[in-house]
Amino acid sequence: MNTILRRAVVATAAAALGLPVLAACGSPDSGSGSGSGGSGSGDKTVRLVSHDSFVASDAVLKQFTAQTGYKVQVIKGGDAGAAVNQAILSKSHPQGDVFFGVDNTLLSRALDKGLFTPYRAKGADRVPAELRGDTKDRVTPTDYGDICVNYDRAYFADKKLAPPQTFADLVKPEYKNLLVTENVATSSPGLAFQLGTVAAFGENGWQDYWKKLKDNGVEVVDGWEQAYNTRFSGSAAGKKAKGDRPLVVSYASSPPAEVMGVKPEPAEAPTGVATGTCFRQVEYAGLLSGAKNTEGGKALIDFLVGKTFQEDMPLQMFVNPVNRDARVPELFTKYGAKITQSATLDPQRIAQHRDQWIKTWSSLVLK
């Protein structure tokens, strides 16, 4: 996932597709921009291209600079899908050195377009093999999260109705007109939720499931921000917006995000997770082909999978670290849902069918 404080607090992961917005973290050195695709040995700025949801603490970025001598400039390019598409379009003249945030729903598109140069990160051995995504080391896993239906605890308690827990529950009459989800064609979590239904019901069954979901009153909006912060009744922002949908497609880490900073600390989060509706989303970073500062880019990728960044990341972006040595914050373990089974699909299968699945979904649900 985007992402999740970045999705649940910063509220930027599902930004509308559009022109990239540039935002710098750290100031470029006078030597930045030098070189033309070489090692960039004289360039002391390393440029990280990402989606709008990338967040890292200043102290951690300064630690990277202290360790390596490189300053980090972050170049943000909208939602994850928009950022990947922009990176592909600008491949011959890349905006930066490293791309952060391509996930397993979009990975094959980036790899097929030759977006990345192979590099095996130092510390890659601390990342579980099942998260790798590419045997050629063109990308390095950085984090993972589970996209699941979240529910408004207060609503279901008031109605004396048990919240749904599975995909099958969502089409039952008692949950009619309660769910809001994101457009599969314009939203990363929306696409992941749809892929979860493919994994659950198969190639011959997911269409019928979505017909039932549509008949049961599912609402579709463009992106996560609108779904979670406007239409969902369980989020703090949704309450202010008078959202009236007590079910939303979001993240397993959204409940901890709702609790962060709340005083006194509640016994439980105001939102819960339907643990039988989850799809595992893995994010990757890669060294961009044609990068000006390849050495700086390699150093940054090493840092992204290192313990310092991995332990900072959960409370910055509300995703799970991939480094086995990284500690998960208590906020996650106390308020987060424990997902024992999360649906997955092989990235190559996604690559083969994604566009047709999106087209079919759009004709079934949006018309």
Image: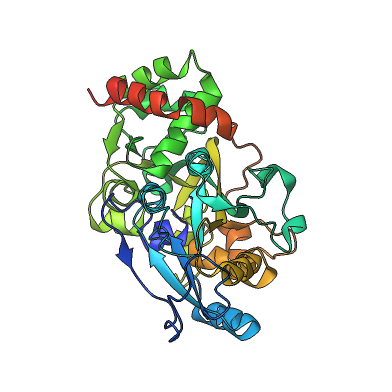
The residue nearer to you, when weighing 367 against 277, is: 367
Q: Position of residue 285 (x, y in %)?
A: 56, 56
Q: Position of residue 156 (x, y in %)?
A: 40, 40
Q: Position of residue 314 (x, y in %)?
A: 56, 63
The quadrant of the rendering that contains the C terminus is: top left
Which image quarter: residue 333? bottom right
Give the left or right position of residue 38, taking residue 151 as reference.
right
Which image quarter: residue 174? top left
Q: Is residue 358 above or below residue 183?
A: above
Q: Position of residue 34 (x, y in %)?
A: 45, 76
The residue nearer to you, when weighing 28 against 235, is: 28
Name the residue at 53% across, 38% down: 278
Which image quarter: residue 122? bottom right
Give the left or right position of residue 142, taking residue 204 as reference.
right
Tell me how the rendering is colored.
rainbow
Residue 333 visible in the current orientation: yes
Residue 160 visible in the current orientation: no
Give the left or right position of residue 69, taking residue 127 as reference.
left
